[in-house]
Amino acid sequence: MKNLKQLIKTASKYRKKYFIGIFFLLLIDFIQLIPPRLLGYLTDSMQKGTANRELLLRYIIYTLLIYLVMAFGRYIWRVYIFGTSRLIEYDMRNNLFKHLQSLSLSFYNSNKTGDLMALATNDLNAVRAALGPGIIMLTDSIVLSITTLIIMLSINVKLTLLSLIPLPFVALISTKFGRMIHRRFLKVQQAFSKLTDMVQENFSGIRIIKSFVQEAKEAEKFTRENMNNFNTNMHLIRIWGLFFPLIEFVASLSFVILLGVGGAYVIYNKISLGDFITFNMYLGSLVWPMMAVGWVINMLQRGLASFERIQDVLNQKPEIVDRYVDDVKSLNGDIHIQNLTFTYPGNETPSLKNINITLKKGQTLGIIGRTGSGKSTLVNLLVRLYNVKDNNIFINGHDINRIPLKVLRENIGLVPQDAFLFSTTIAENINLACEDFDMDRIIESAKASDIYDNIMDFSNKFETVVGERGVTLSGGQKQRVSISRAIIKNPDILVFDDCLSAVDAKTEVKILDNLRKIMRDRTSIIISHRISAVKDADLIVVLENGEIVEKGTHSELVTSGGLYQSIYEKQLLEEKIQEEV
Ligand SMILES: Nc1ncnc2c1ncn2[C@@H]1O[C@H](COP(=O)(O)OP(=O)(O)OP(=O)(O)O)[C@@H](O)[C@H]1O
């Protein structure tokens, strides 16, 4: 009920447009009652012998004019009602997208992308159908059936009641079949989306498929899914195929009754021939509203259910918001983490335990640790991708929960582990977070992250489009573009989350050396699996199972006999072996 009210509220924003549309719809409904009456009168005049050429011509002109007005009116209500439902769909889609953008990462972790896409496609379509064709059918079937019935009753009550006997069955069949058709239609949609998902995954994983010689197996899997798609379509076609002939048959029983009873009435002069013809035409126009009853009920139910699903998402509050903020404009760069323990929402064991780190502005922190030890988690918390408790992380003396989210994220340049590039030009990818487009700055940051020469080798240079329709960048190139994107923002704090894993150790060190000029006045955090990347840091922490197990400088840790030393010795050995090879 609450959702129905909300749906009406959403639609009422455009009530003027709806009003115009429904006004014309009603007007046409009334006007379309005239031609059968005219034909009846004409038939009677012909039978009585009072019809002449002028009368015929007058009736032809009237009929023509009526159909012309009807065509115009139908155009108007189509534009206004269908157009308004599209406008509401447009508004809702914008709101939904904006809202989804505001929701936190944990929401995306617990909702599948496919489900969210379905909200923006299938569910929104169902709401639009309810607010467009649904409203039309509802108005049409109520008004048309009442007015037609009144006129038919005014001609002959008994004939009306007798010939209407089969029509409730039309409404019943259309309601029952409507539900069945909808269920089968959903299955068709599911089968088709399974098929497209499979093709999409297959295309993006084509390298794996080829290298593991899986083409034949994939084709076989595809044939199975394709067959499933065909079968579900056939299932639907069969019921569709049955639906219309059945409705037509049941509706035709009304005409049979009319033919028998009405025909007899004409023979015994209870009604005129003209009335008989008029009656016939009205009966024809009653079949459609009866059929529409079932559809309309289904359409409105579906629309409301979809609207509820959309509202559920719209009612979700972003978890990470500015609750109480200090007046902070920039971050300067001191970082103090104290007694930080963090558990991901839904997890039982903490991913970080009792972390304590202090960094002064301009210092560099190196974080080393095995996979899954909590390195990314730590830096993700610095930009509040997840909520941390108060008094755990301070930047510049402010609890990060008191720093405006925008200031926090704008002033920390985080280069994530997976370098994601958008399907646009390299320049726009680098410039992502900047308001204006300054080519000199883009070039400067590309040079600093050692990607400039690679970009100049592409024929379109910085205008090269990356992604599906453009050039495929290597893993290492993508990572360096991603670094450029972070440093162009001139952030107070730079965080490199194992973002050079795709280049070899030497190149990683070379790129980090290049970046040192930029890092000089900034606080930096470097996460890496390689000791060579962090050895010059002012402070190195070693994480193991979410805990800091060692802390110090390279020279202190390398002789401490702990995990750091063993990783260092292993990597030294690997380097030696590589050099000898
Ligand atoms: N979004 C998440 N939801 C729940 N648990 C998570 C999430 N992300 C990471 N974890 C868990 O937290 C722990 C630490 O993961 P994290 O990604 O921080 O490790 P890492 O040291 O960065 O690993 P790697 O070197 O492989 O990137 C792991 O046990 C992981 O399964």
Image: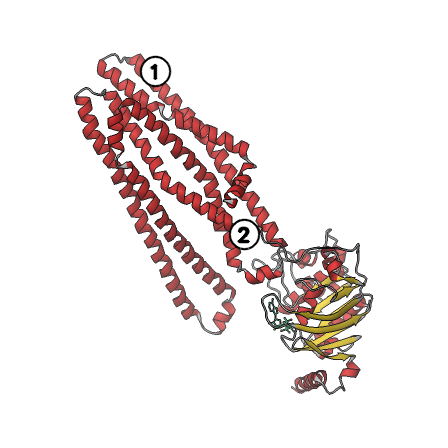
Compared with residue 401, is residue 38 higher up or lower down, i.e. above or below?
above
Depicted 129 relative to depicted 373: above or below = above
- Label of residue 510 in the image: none
Residue 527 to residue 569: above or below: above
Snapshot quadrant of residue 452: bottom right
Count neighbours of disc 2 (C-alpha within 10 A) and say few if under 14, some if 14 to 19, many if 20 or more: few
Q: Which of 157 and 405 is in front in this view?
A: 157
Report the quarter where the C terminus lies: bottom right
- The residue mark sitting in front, 1 or 2, is 2
Asked if residue 573 shows in the view, the reply is yes
Verify CB contact (< 8 Å) between mark 1 and mark 2: no
In the image, which disc is placed on residue 58?
1
Residue at x-position 61% and y-position 50%: 98
In the rendering, at what x and y percent does residue 101 appear?
Answer: 62, 54
Residue at image mark 2: 312
- Does 221 appear above or below 427? below
Q: Where is residue 512 in the image (x, y as percent from the top left)?
A: 75, 71
Amino acid at pointer 1: Arg
